Image: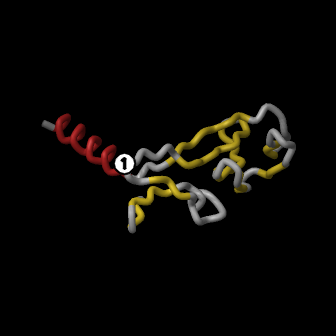
Amino acid sequence: MFAFKTLFVCFIFFVHFSIYCHGYSYLQPIKFGDGECITDDWQIHPIGAIWYDHEKCEQLECIFHGDTLYIQGYGCGKIGHPKECWLIPGKGANYPGCCPQVACLDNLVN
C-alpha cells in the first residue's frame, strides 16, 4: 500500500509540474576559461552572471558545478495550438516574456 501511495504522489507531482513546463533548459560545458564563462562570440561572464540572448529568447547563466564551468540556458518551448488560432510574439524584452503566445479570436491562451 505504501508503494502505491508513493507512486500516486509522484504521479500527481509530475502532472502538476508538467502543466507549468513551457520551455526547455540545457547545460553547455565550457572547455576553457579560468573562473569565467566564455561564450561562442567571446563574451566573458563571471560565475553567477545572468544574461540574455534576445535572438533566441533565452536566459543564460554561468554556473560552476563539480569541477566544470557550464552555461545553463532556458528558452521557450514549442507551442501547439488549434488551427483556428495563431502565434503572436511575446511582449517582453527578456525570457520568458519574449516567448510567443497563442491567440484565438478575441482572447489570449497561455
Q: Residue at x 17, y 36 (%)?
A: 4
State left or right for residue 90 relative to residue 38.
left
Task: Decide: is 13 above or below 93.
Answer: above
Q: Secondary structure at mark 1?
A: loop
Q: Nearer the viewer, residue 97 or 31?
A: 97
Q: How is the image coloured?
A: secondary structure
To which quarter of the image does residue 31 belong?
top right
To which quarter of the image does residue 38 belong?
top right
x, y percentage for residue 55? Answer: 70, 50
State left or right for residue 19 relative to residue 51.
left
x, y percentage for residue 109? Answer: 39, 60
x, y percentage for residue 6? Answer: 23, 40
State left or right for residue 93 relative to residue 89.
right
Q: How many marks?
A: 1
Q: Nearer the viewer, residue 80 or 85?
A: 85
Q: Residue at x 39, y 63 (%)?
A: 105
Residue indicated by mark 1: 82
Q: Residue at x 20, y 34 (%)?
A: 3
Task: Decide: is 104 above or below 27.
Answer: below
x, y percentage for residue 104? Answer: 39, 59
Q: Residue at x 81, y 46 (%)?
A: 36
Let me know if residue 17 appears in the view.
no
Q: Nearer the viewer, residue 86 or 7?
A: 86
* Amino acid type, callout 1: Pro
Q: Quadrant of the N terminus?
A: top left
Let me know if residue 19 appears in the view.
yes
Q: Nearer the viewer, residue 73 or 35?
A: 73
Task: Decide: is 93 above or below 8.
Answer: below
Identity of the residue furthest to the left in this view:
1
